[in-house]
Image: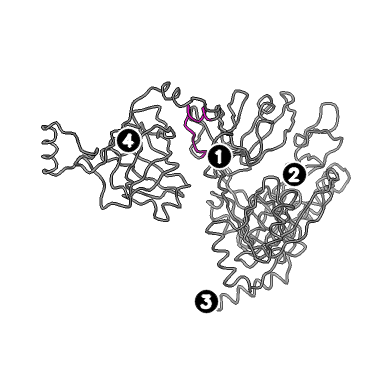
Amino acid sequence: MQTSVTPDAISAVLSNPSFDSSSSDRSEIVVQVVDLKPIGNRYTFNANDGKMKVKAMFTASLTPEIISGKIQNLGLIRLVDFTVNDISSKSTKYFLVTKCESVGSALDSEINSESKSEEEAGEAKRQKLDHSSPVGGVVSTGITLNPKQEFVAKSASQIISEQRGNAAPAARMSMTRRVQPLVSLNPYQGSWTIKVRVTNKGVMKTYRNAKGEGCVFNVELTDEEGTQIQAAMFNDAARKFYDRFQLGKVYYISRGSLKLANKQFKTVENDYELTLNENSEVEEASNEETFVPETKFNFVPIEELGMYVNQRELVDLIGVVQSVSPTMSIRRRTDNEMIPKRDITLADESKKTVVVSLWNNLATGIGQELLDMADKSPVIAIKSLKVGDFQGVSLSTISRSNVVINPESPEAKKLKSWYASEGKEASMSSIGSGMTPSTKNGSWSMYTDRVPLSQITSNPSLGEEKPVFFTTRGYISFIKPDQTMWYQGCKTCNKKVTEAMDSGYWCEGCQKKDEECRLRYIMVVKVSDSTGEAWFSSFNEEAEKIIGCSADELNKLRSEGGDVNEFQTKLKEATWSSHVFRISVTQNEYNGEKRQRITVKAVAPVDFAAESRILLQDISKKNTV
């Protein structure tokens, strides 16, 4: 094992603005890891060469080596691949280490070549007087010197000229610019190059707005660490790059722009989104080693799936396979095409099961693998599932869903251990079995997470970081008759439409005109209980249950004349009626002030038998305290 560092390595790197750690002719760099500290899922440290230190960070892909003890504090590592970045708030630099090798275990103390004993200092002085050079390239400080690996300062043009040679265009791009991980990108950077795999490719879409007609398509890109970003291309850029981007291939990309992602439309977990124009550079990394990006999951327990039913948000799931159905053919309503489907049943530690529908290639490929090994109860992880309300709660794969069989992750190991010890014999129940027909419209159990209104309104910070969900029972105490209670929606996709120039209505989502539209509720109601009151936002399906009729029918009553105002009568009939609400609480900013927004996710009439059972359970709990 090595016990010394490369002298003056850090100063040589920092003094060379065109330094490239991937160059084949560069000198070996061995540094000591000092002050190793965790920050999130990464670790920072100071890289020490005995004379100089520089702040550094390991990428997330190296975290397992730190946890396992391969990389230790005060240990020695050889830097194989890293980048030199600027700290924007300071005029200092730091190393972002993407690949390294442990070459020495933890030393007793920090290496410091400046501190010498008197004997060592005298020996060094005698060697200088005798004009004798160190034998074997080792000086008395204990730091290994290798004369053949001296750093030679070169200009950027020299380095580029030496490295290009006969390299392919994509390789030349990676040599002239340092490849950066996606996590390090931000809108304030200048030039950058990323190396990413296309993990999802959208279809070319056309649109029409006030500026005219255009086209757009999106791709989802993933780097070696598993970080994802969505890239959009419009018009000329879309036509230029649509055929170039191929699903599953790896590319070098540069000269794009970043902006904050629109949370309503983003499909990956990234605060930013990438826009490529016709001047952007996209070159395939075809003649070099590629990578398989690590899939990152954010698992949702099966028992918590109910709150995601019929929502835009996709979920990741991990579970033990309980059963696998044969492949069946389903006729698609949009084009009458027959597509393959296969249902699998998964269970997890909550002792709940859920049915996941695999479609298209996943049904015939991965689905067949699971059928062949179903008797072994494999664990599978699925990314990007849509949650529907069939049989209470059901899951379906979409075009960008990814299925991993028996993943090597802590969650999978924990699930396997649980299933082997107790899960195999445990009694399971379907996640949808706890929902009565009146609540199968997207609610989780209407009798869990029950809170009074005062608990929500008295805590203004609820929902700051992410939406929180509750169930509450209350009365509709007031409905504003003069509010905007609906919008004109597309009959196909339900999105808002605008009146066309000649006649009819134009839908931006479907990119088509229709002679008719459908009114859809978007209204607020005041809800009261014995502890307080609050305003709830309610959308179409939930509002129809509150009002008792559709928005088109209510609009017809408003437009009708007569001695009796049927519109006002209908609203009064809806007030002071008791309901059970499943709600989400979030924070919205209005005029610079944060406000609570309570949205109805599901509504059901009061089941008095169930309410009585809840009261009896509460009484029983209080008696046992």
- The answer to whether residue 360 is left or right of residue 182 is right
Residue 169 horizontal/vertical position (percent): 55, 27
Q: Nearer the viewer, mark 4 or mark 3?
A: 4
Front position among marks 1 and 2: 1
Residue under label 1: 290
Q: Which residue is mark 2?
A: 485
Residue contact between numbered discs 4 and 3, judged by CB atoms under 8 Å? no
Q: SS for tag 4?
A: helix
| 193 vs 321: above or below | above
Q: Of circles 2 and 4, which is in front?
A: 4
Task: Give residue 253's position: percent from left, percent from top.
Answer: 56, 31
Q: Kindly identify which numbered label has been placed on residue 549.
A: none
Residue highlighted by disc 4: 10
Whole-angstrom CA distance, mark 4 to mark 1, is: 29 Å
Query: In the image, 44: left or right of 108?
Result: right
Q: Quadrant of residue 367?
A: bottom right
